[in-house]
Image: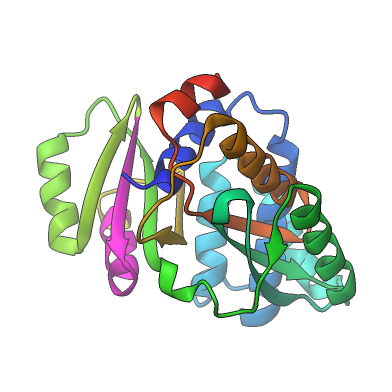
Amino acid sequence: MSGHNKWSSIKHKKGAADAKRSKIFSKLSKEITVAAKLGGTDIESNARLRLAVQNSKGQNMSKDVIDRAIHKAEKDASTFEELTFEGYGIGGIAIFVECLSDNNNRTVSSVRSAFTKFGGHLGTNGSLSFLFDRKGIFVIQNLDNLDLEEFELEMIDAGAEEFEENENLIMVTTALEDFGNVSKKLEEMGIEPESQELQRIPNTTTTLIIEDAKKVLRLVEKLEDDDDVQKVFHNLEITDDLEKSLE
């Protein structure tokens, strides 16, 4: 299991009571607005918007909030740009940051400041591309009436590569090119994931001593707290000892 996937699972377990829920809603709303700006407000004809709305519903965002985010695209004059940053944390941990920004200078300054504060540094774009694979990640509630064996067979037929059960959650991993097939199959089965998105999954992970690993995770959390940052990926191995130290 990759460190990134395991850290995602940890965050999902804590997510319901997390004080950062409003921050999550803010990022989801921004993605909805940007998707509507780029591809129009019709959910059926705009795949990116449809995915953003599905993820928002998976996080229990209300219909009113979703509708406001969609209609904001028609009124808001702001122009958002997709930016990526690649850098290293303590111990050479690779960190990939995806942003949506209406002010490049602000975003660059903020991201660079976070890396510097926690002992890391930014690299050149493209320097980490060989360390990560783009994968589809689906997080699904382990429904009581779900036949897991039949579910896995259906998912494999659609292109699923890996399954991971964690308490009441199932995480399904797919190749980039099979993301749409698995999403469509879940829709046909009447299953609405908590989230479904493309992530950057590390090819290999690196283990650090607990103290250094915690510094890397503080950098990750600092980046995730930034309003311009949508997603952060890393190749830190989340060991059992590190997980226990975070409880």
Q: Quadrant of the C terminus?
A: top right
**Residue 50, percent across and down?**
52, 65
Q: Nearer the viewer, residue 169 or 147?
A: 169
Residue 170, image x, y percentages:
31, 38
* The N terminus - image quarter: top left
Left or right of residue 29: residue 233: left
Residue beneath the point at 21% across and 57% down? 161
* Quarter where residue 142 is shown: top left
User: Up-down: is 61 above or below 197?
Assistant: above
Residue 62 at least partly seen: no
Q: Which residues are magenta?
A: 169-186
Is any part of residue 206 visible from this angle? yes
> What residue lies at 84% left-to-right and 73% top-to-bottom?
102
Does residue 19 sit above or below 224 in this rendering? above
Where is residue 207? Give x, y as percent: 44, 42
The picture quadrant where one finds residue 18 is top right
Residue at 86% over, 66% down: 109
Is 23 a magenta residue?
no
**Residue 42, relative to residue 119: is it above or below?**
below
Residues 178 and 36: in front is 178
**Frontmost residue, 217 versus 119:** 119
Magenta residue check for 176 = yes
Magenta: main secondary structure: helix
